[in-house]
Amino acid sequence: METPKLSVLPYKGTRDFFPDEMRARNRFFDSVRRTLERACFEEYGGPMLESLDLYAAKSGEELAKEQTYHFEDRGGRHLAIRPEMTPTVARMVAEKIGELNFPLRWYSFPNMYRYERPQRGRLREFWQLNVDVFGCDGVEADFDCIKAAVDILTDMGADAGMFTVHINNRRFFNDVLAALTGQTGESARKVSKIVDHRGKVAREVYEKELTEQGLDAAAIAKIDALYAMDVKTATALCPDSVGAAELNGLFDLLEETGLLPFCVFDFGIVRGLDYYTGTVFEVFDNDPDNNRAMFGGGRYDNLVGLFVGNAKVSGVGFGMGDVTLENFINTHGLLKETQAGAARVLVTRFADVPLSAYMALCDAFRAAGIPASVYLGDKKFGKQIDYAVRGGYTHVAIMGGDELAAGTVKLKNLATREETVSPRDRVTDNLI
């Protein structure tokens, strides 16, 4: 019986990264890290596996039960492969709460897994940037996270025409909902879920769901009117709301620091996860070919306290998935690869020169900070040149028996075809 052949394709919703794709990924990973570390954010990490209860308690039953890869281990423990990072970082802060220097400004870039239908901008395995500030109750922490998000994109070459940060406040949302419709508590939470999906369902479905929660046509019209309001007009509806004061303070700060052109008030931004308590925001790509929410976040002041009963540590942050970020970069032509000034040398080989001599020459390039490798194999010189061109090398180093005896190396620029001859101990001079 013939053995079935294994598929060469990755598991549905995951990706292979070949070297050229890894170079592109590393460019934007490196850009993100430079931006955040310039702003004194510090990188942390956490485990791939957590208790399933952690996500059920912190993220909601839908994420925990329907979107996680979860299983029972040999010890009978119910575990999940992490679908997000916020519950983990909240747990970590609680674990060392007496030792940490608050406010904390942390970030991570781990890979996550969610069992959902793969589509544009959404896969089952993805990498997600997480940026968080712990231990600051004021809107300056909300501002700091929004500024970090804006800086990440502008440092890649984006401008205010390419993206917009849509901002709301959960406290304000609940207060204005209660004032206009009388919805509070669990009913208000259900309405917030419906509003959060407003742009993803048909209008008749949206209205039907709100009607089922007790809202009549007049109440729905009042909610609709909020979508066209600016922040000052909307917050005037609930002048005593703490959330309204937070929104006004945040937008004043955005205006004073020059970030307002990147931002807009949007009553429809609610964020579906249950743990958000204050400011919430989502960043939208403005290009019509990719016009969608790329990432978002907000304030979650109660998470750490769920681990340590008497702890009151506020938190605010955002998560940015690599899939939507890649789409944004590609849509707008950002972070283009350039080889200008980046030398990469292939040391070619001839049968009359020992391999150890080529290895020593290769080490000389590497010691000078120039990427280099020795050709592996015994192909003819022309084939080695073809390999160098296809492999993205900028130069080839040529050292046959005559050059070895003379103590010289010939260096060929593959773009210009220019050749230079140098003493072996100075071969790197023209490349540094």
Image: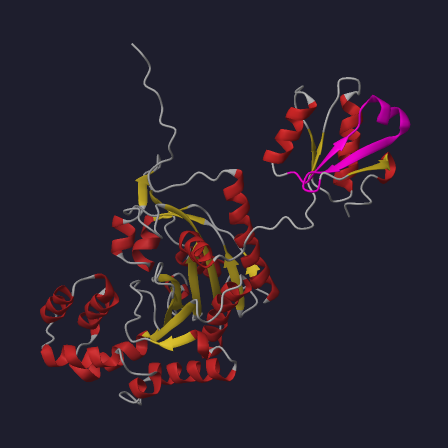
Q: Is residue 140 left or right of residue 302?
A: right
The magenta segment: 393-416
Q: Is residue 34 left or right of residue 108?
A: right
The residue lying furthest to the top in this view is: 1
Q: Position of residue 6 (x, y in %)?
A: 36, 24
The answer to which image quadrant residue 167 occupies is bottom left
Q: Position of residue 98 (x, y in %)?
A: 53, 64
Q: Is residue 371 visible?
A: yes
Q: Residue at x 39, y 85 (%)?
A: 248
Tell whether position 102 is magenta. Answer: no
The answer to which image quadrant residue 420 occupies is top right
Q: Residue at x 78, y 43 (%)?
A: 368
Which quarter of the image is occupied by the N terminus? top left
Is 203 in front, or is 63? Answer: 203
Is 303 in front, or is 226? Answer: 226
Q: Position of residue 204 (x, y in %)?
A: 12, 66
Q: How many marks?
A: 0
